[in-house]
Structure formats: structure tokens, C-alpha cells
Image (spheres, rainbow, N blue to C red):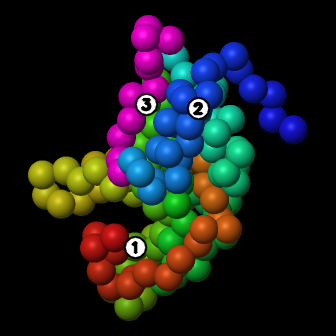
Amino acid sequence: MIAKSPVEKPLREALGAIVEGRIVKRVKHELIHGGKDLTEVFVEELARRGYRPTTVGEVNVEPGERVPAFLVESGVAYFGWVFWEQFTSWKIRKLWGSVIKNSRGDWEIQIPATRKTTIYANESQKIEMDIDHPPEF
């Protein structure tokens, strides 16, 4: 069982809504509320919903699939996907890409499979994607 930090139920529900992405769009969310860093509580809510700490390289995802995942750092949660980006029919790479795009339309934050950065991924929510058009998530 996950130990719960002493945080009001409505605040936990709001953080859960971010994780689920049904009521609140999953993009970039500040985890500071009333001067308090809620990162620990957000990570607890991630765990309650099946998100586990891992690295991009450890996520079980095949080309043509994507897995939802959050990068949590410095009091901010960034949503993105772990997937395989295809450059040519023979050149692909596995990465986590944020749903936030830069001015060129590419992922603003990218984490390659070789980096040991902790992300929180939920492999049970793996879905298919068009490997030829990953920016069209």
C-alpha cells in the first residue's frame, strides 16, 4: 500500500486528473501549490494509477506502439510518450518525447533510450501508433 502524504482529498483528485488526462489535458503541470512542492504526492498518484519509475530503455514498447509516461523534475510534471521514431526504413530510435513541441514542431524535451533519466511509465496503457507520423499523436 502506498503511504499518503497529508494532503487534502480535492488536491489529490486534481493531481489524479492530471495523471489520467480525462478532465485535464496532460501537458506541463507545475507541482507547486500554495508554496508547497507536491512532487511526492504526484508520484504517489502516478503509482496509484499504474505508473512505475523506469527509464526509456527499460520500457517495453515495440515500433508502432507508444506508452504514456511522465518526466517529473524540479517541481514540474511533463507528459509525453515512449515510442520508436523512424527516420528511414532501417534507421529508428527509441525515445520519450514530450507532447510540448518546439518552434520546429519537434518534441521540446527528448530523452533517448541511452539516458538513465527516471520517467514514470504505464505499460498497461500501451497503444498503437503510426510509426511514420509520430508527431501526430
Q: Tell me the kind of residue under disc 3.
A: Val
Q: Position of residue 105 (x, y in %)?
A: 18, 60
Q: Is residue 33 magenta?
A: yes
Give the label, 2 or 1, closer to the camera.
Answer: 2
Q: Is residue 4 magenta?
A: no
Residue under the point 59% across and 32% down: 12
Measure the alpha-carbon separation of dots 2 and 3.
Answer: 16 Å
- The quadrant the C terminus occupies is bottom left
Mark 2 closeness class: few <14, some 14–19, many ≥20 residues within 10 Å: some
- Which of pointers 1 and 3 indicates the residue nearer the eye? 3
Q: CA distance from mark 1 to mark 3?
A: 25 Å
Q: Residue 120: where, in percent of width, then height?
A: 61, 48
Label 1 vs 3, first from the N-terminus: 3
Marking on residue 12? 2
Q: Position of residue 60 (x, y in %)?
A: 66, 69
Position of the N terminus, as image quadrant, is top right
Q: Position of residue 75 (x, y in %)?
A: 46, 24
Q: Mark 1 is on which residue type? A: Glu
| Distance from the alpha carbon under mark 2 to that under mark 1 | 34 Å
The residue tagged 3 is 76
Q: Residue at x 61, y 55 (%)?
A: 121
- Please report the residue visible at 50 percent of the width from the left and 11 percent of the height from the top: 36
Residue at numbered disc 1: 85
Residue at horizontal 38 percent and vertical 91 percent from the top: 89
Report the residue that reaches farthest toward the bottom. Answer: 89
Q: Nearer the viewer, residue 23 or 27?
A: 23
Mark 3: few, some, or many residues within 10 Å (few <14, many ≥20)?
some
- Region in magenta: 25-36
Q: Nearer the viewer, residue 68 or 20?
A: 20
Residues tagged 2 and 1 counted as in contact (Cβ below 8 A): no
In primary-sequence order, the first of circles 2 and 3 is 2
